[in-house]
Image: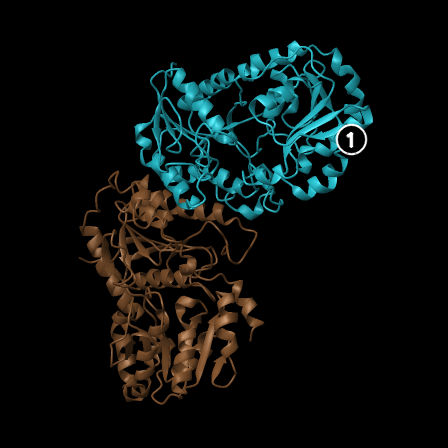
Chain colours: A brown, B cyan
């Protein structure tokens, strides 16, 4: 089957332009998909903000991102943005939804072509109610094998990809460990500090303070500017530099990682990973080759001396082989082909719609998967 | 044309059951419509919470109101509630939306039967963007001639109605003025106080403190428990008693009233109204017959002596003639007939979709039309 000429609609979030000039991970993935498919010859229409930069067709309801103009009523324009696509659904052969669960509720009452939803994250247990209710109207892609809900039927795992040319491979790095991301207990910066202290290694941390109480209690007291350094938030070249010069990335999540873009970026620089042996990490890090899968701090401490024995070229090769944008597009092409051939699952049963009887009903809300809002970033600057 | 057997879907809000046991004005109107149409022989399906009490068909996604269980994710279940209707739209001949603008965005991408939206209130200027974008997929009803946006095409004015048997007609009332509703500058309780003081009349106020700063600054200092009384929030029989024994209701809104259910309730008790000469009030109050239309405090003060000369039976008669639930149903029946005969307006032009060029774009947000949340009520109890 060839997809050339296939009329594809890609639905992006509208918090930021697509691609985003700064923060905006979902917008970035949506751009990578839309642009990648355009390069493969599909007839792509991107639904995004009006100030998005896309070489294919662009459809917009708002001139700029909701995050760029606080006066915009997000509820109104998000709804119109979604409706704008479903209103034109008949003009497409396939719709790729990168905007979580809500667009699927629009598909329930609409005769649409096949809909593919990439589950970028489950922000609260109750959105599973929406996923279950809509499962008969959308195919799902997960961003790792680990990040799957057992009640949903998935079409494919479509790992996010990066452009490796944006990262500098470094054969001869420095001797420090690096932590990159957000200060939140589940991201394990406190474990990275413990590993650095127990091995006598320097640690450089670049992150935003998503959980400020955690930052002030568990992180800040350890920052001495020497062994334990906090370098603020880093972007582009500074990020590249920080990663490529590191002995290893420490990524000891306490909650299973969904994907882990930072891991891939580090490996693209040739930097191996000390990663928690949970979630998606075993799918990305080849134990003993591109880093080590560690059970807890003790396990990680044990592996630190072996880091220099790893071939940094293997890290880079792993990314080029499996985690580039082009490989992501390959996976989505295969997923699209399957979606066009397959039938969707049947409508939910009355039992499935008895929300309160599901085991996820009483799970505490986990909002930590919601991307941190940009206005938390300026607050960080004062902490530098 | 007869509507008997017409398959009607009525979409109610799901903050409270339909009808609501306590607060819940939109749920109450939705119930009155659904139940009234059922009594007229239509085949009615009410989309509401599972614990709603309706003698026709009931369709629900949530077992109880979002306002009854704070653990419910309102965004998820509101979306599923709306989608649940549009998913079954083909099973109806007509859909009556009492849930503001958002359901219309679902109709954009859906082949639905005619949709009628009652505009119960414009909660923010930007929701006009949604109304304009969806105007070609829904007919609109306004709740008064005054409460119309000039850019929208309306099918009918469908005044809300009450059951007059729930209110006691009183020929020989007391000598006090009454204020009923919410403490918010635009509701004019401070003007009622001024009128009472300048005429030497007693004033009894029953209201919830929607704007607490306003209450503490403009209202509370005047409450002496004698001439100016605050009697808390009153419901059902206490409300009936308070209204029927009053010399007049003072309703001096500083912002044009959209409809004014309290005015109708007072008149059902035989109680005339000192009302601001703006918004919907001239459509309800017959000047010099069921009350007086007043330009400001001075105008109202002038009319107070004439209140006893009004025939209280005329107030009751006005309600029975024009503002009962049955009259409301008559108006909606006529509106339904017109909707089934007429074509919807055309799709919006690109100019109409350039939101920033509309004169409403820079208007300040006016959230005062959003019904006050129930948890503001318990706070009031401490003020009694």
Residue B267 place in picture, x, y as percent = 63, 17
Quadrant in which residue B320 is drawn:
top right
**Residue in view at x 52 percent, y 64 percent:** A376
Q: Identify the residue at image location x=20%, y=58%.
A: A2
Q: Secondary structure at mark 1?
A: helix
Q: Is residue B92 left or right of residue B12?
A: left
- State left or right for residue A5 relative to residue B211: left
Residue B149 placement: quadrant = top right
What residue is disc 1 on? B194
Q: Can residue B119 be seen at all in this image of the molecule?
A: no
Quadrant occupied by the C terminus of chain A? bottom right
Residue lying at 57% horizontally and 42% vertically, measured from the top left: B125
Q: Residue at x 67, y 11 (%)?
A: B312
Residue A168 visible? The answer is yes
Relative to B232, A325 lies left or right? left
Tell how many labels: 1
Front-most of residues A233 and B73: B73
Closer-to-camera residue (B333/A355)? A355
Horizontal arrangement in the rendering, residue A51 relative to residue A256 (left or right): right
The picture places residue A217, in percent across and down from the top left corner, at: 51, 71
| Residue A60, above or below A222 | above
Badge 1: chain ID: B
Q: Nearer the viewer, residue B87 or A383?
A: A383
- Residue B102 lies, in percent from the top left, at 45, 39
Q: Quadrant of the N terminus of chain A?
A: bottom left
């Amino acid at each position: 089957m060839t997809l050339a000429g296939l009329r594809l609609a890609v639905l992006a979030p509208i918090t930021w332009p697509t691609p985003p000039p700064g923060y905006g991970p979902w917008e970035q993935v949506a751009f990578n998909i839309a642009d990648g498919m355009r390069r493969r010859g599909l007839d792509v229409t991107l639904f995004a903000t009006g100030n998005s930069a896309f070489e294919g067709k662009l459809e917009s309801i708002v001139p700029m991102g909701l995050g760029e103009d606080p006066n915009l009523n997000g509820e109104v324009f998000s709804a119109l943005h979604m409706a704008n696509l479903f209103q034109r659904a008949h003009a497409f052969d396939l719709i790729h939804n990168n905007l979580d669960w809500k667009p699927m509720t629009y598909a329930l009452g609409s005769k649409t072509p096949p809909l593919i939803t990439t589950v970028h994250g489950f922000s609260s247990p109750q959105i599973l109610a929406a996923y279950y209710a809509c499962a008969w109207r959308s195919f799902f892609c997960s961003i790792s094998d680990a990040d799957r809900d057992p009640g949903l039927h998935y079409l494919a795992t479509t790992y996010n990809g990066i452009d490796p040319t944006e990262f500098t491979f470094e054969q001869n790095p420095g001797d420090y460990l690096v932590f990159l991301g957000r200060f939140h207990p589940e991201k394990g910066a406190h474990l990275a500090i413990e590993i650095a202290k127990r091995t006598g290694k320097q640690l450089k941390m670049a992150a935003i303070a998503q959980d400020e109480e955690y930052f002030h209690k568990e992180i800040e007291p350890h920052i001495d500017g020497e062994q334990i350094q906090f370098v603020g938030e880093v972007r582009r070249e500074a990020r590249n530099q920080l990663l490529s010069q590191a002995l290893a990335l420490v990524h000891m999540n306490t909650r299973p990682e969904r994907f882990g873009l930072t891991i891939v970026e580090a490996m693209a620089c040739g930097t191996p990973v000390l990663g928690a042996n949970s979630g998606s990490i075993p799918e990305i890090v080849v134990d003993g080759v591109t880093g080590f899968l560690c059970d807890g701090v003790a396990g990680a401490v044990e592996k630190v001396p072996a880091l220099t024995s790893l071939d940094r070229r293997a890290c880079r090769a792993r990314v080029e082989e499996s985690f580039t944008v082009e490989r992501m597009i390959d996976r989505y092409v295969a997923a699209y082909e399957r979606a066009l051939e397959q039938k969707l699952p049947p409508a939910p049963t009355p039992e499935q719609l008895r929300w309160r009887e599901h085991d996820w009903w009483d799970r505490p809300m986990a909002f930590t998967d919601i991307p941190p809002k940009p206005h938390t970033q300026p607050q960080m600057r004062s902490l530098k």
